[in-house]
Image (tube, rainbow, N blue to C red):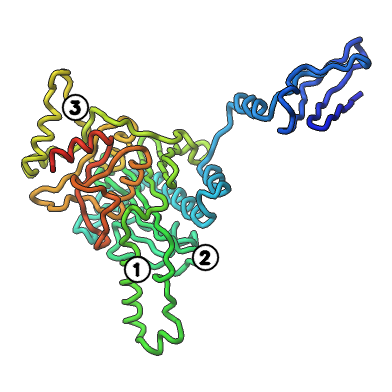
Amino acid sequence: MVALISTSTCQLLYSSSSTTSTTRLLPLRLCFSSCPATATAATRRHGGGVRCAAVGTAAEAAETTKKNSRYEIQTLTGWLLKQEQAGVIDAELTIVLSSISLACKQIASLVQRASISNLTGVQGAVNVQGEDQKKLDVVSNEVFSNCLKSSGRTGIIASEEEDVPVAVEESYSGNYIVVFDPLDGSSNIDAAVSTGSIFGIYSPNDECLADVDDENATVIVPLAPLLQQKQERCVVNVCQPGNNLLAAGYCMYSSSVIFVLSIGKGVFAFTLDPMYGEFVLTQENIQIPKSGKIYAFNEGNYQLWDDKLKKYIDDLKDPGPSGKPYSARYIGSLVGDFHRTLLYGGIYGYPRDKKSKNGKLRLLYECAPMSYLVEQAGGKGSDGHQRILDIEPVEIHQRVPLYIGSTEEVEKLEKYLA
């Protein structure tokens, strides 16, 4: 026999057995959040010989469920949907971020099979920066661009491998601006060392997507000049300071494929689970240590640096009273070096030198997204004199020096360079 006891605030489901003299409660309980705390006390009905087990609050029930769900995983897709439901991001941005994660999965597969698929070596072309393009540079750029275009939510994309920003004609709804380096550290590909993809997302801007087929426009202005004007507006709209970023992140292709993301509410890391083919949440609200004992600079350029920077590096190597100098760690991949710095603390630097007056890293799609991430994690990004996110880009492929990492370490360097 199954009976139901109802009160104004709580419901308990129990069952009695006719084969024994006592009544036994089955392990099935329903409790509403409106149940008072006093409901946790055992309730008895002596007349019918029925004993009711204690019922906890909704919070206690949730905690019990959480402890019992040992196999529960949080995928990137599920996490993004929760952020959308909470009003942190909108549906359009959710789709853009999902398309980026898909591109990263494809690139991860290409990187892992590079030697097998004959994707190592140089493509034979030179990009707009005058750098030799690796085969995977070209392929990764195409993968990234196609995923963003097919999402239908991007209006402009700007890549390290493209001369100018591209207005996406496939857009039919949103028009977010996405800047990216499709494969950072590509010089490491042939040696199977860590590489990565970096991206930043800016607010939509309708001005850039003026319809070139507008009847009035084509009458007054010839089509070619109009397209030129449109392209110029695209460049202007893409050249935004890092302060305007809505989201930024990177994907590291190493022993694990790790997708690190911030949407302005902390930094979260997701690891690609090859069993499910999904990015799974593995680290929440990452905080970089305030200081660290690791530095990552390309000391092969030491003789090309100015004296102030040389003095800084020399002091890092000095054991001092503690007898422990800083440890030097340099991979040659911004994503790999930054990821280690984010987790362990310290400082990463790519300074200007006599050959590269402004350093070699690009402000728009390398320095700004990484500085956005490190600030969300409690760190600092600087060009040695000012905050990276405050710098207003004047061109798409503008280069700036970059010093990024633990707050105390970056501020220490700034004092040397002042």
At a point 68% along the width and 30% down the height, the residue shown is: 58
Q: From what the image shows, is residue 52 above or below residue 99?
A: above
Neighbour tally class for label 1: few under 14, some 14-19, many 20 plus, Cα within 10 Å: many
Marks 2 and 3 in Cβ contact (< 8 Å): no
Q: Residue at x 51, y 48 (%)?
A: 88
Give the mark, 1 or 2, whose residue is nearer the N terminus. Answer: 2
Secondary structure of the residue carrying tag 2 is loop
Q: Which residue is mark 1?
A: 234
Tell me which corner region of the image, top left, top right, bottom left or bottom right, holds residue 262.
top left
Image position, residue 221 (x, y; %): 35, 86
| Image: 219 above or below 107 | below
**Who comes first in sequence, dot 2 or dot 3?**
2
Q: Is there any visible trace of residue 125 in the rendered image?
A: no
Left or right, 66 with reference to 213: right
Amino acid bearing label 1: Cys
Residues 15 and 35: in front is 35
Q: Which mark is residue 173?
A: 2
Q: Is residue 409 above or below residue 53?
A: below
Picture coordinates of residue 348, whole percent (x, y)? 23, 38
Question: Which class describes the residues within 10 Å of circle 2: few (<14), some (14-19), or many (20+)?
Answer: few
Residue 59 position by quadrant: top right
On the rendered image, what quadrant is the N terminus found in? Answer: top right
* Of pointers 3 and 1, the one earlier in the residue sequence: 1
Element assignment for label 1 = helix
Residue 162 percent coordinates (x, y): 30, 62
Q: Position of residue 46 (x, y in %)?
A: 90, 14
**Quadrant in the picture for the C terminus:** top left
| Label 1 to label 2: alpha-carbon separation | 18 Å
Q: Which residue is mark 3?
A: 326
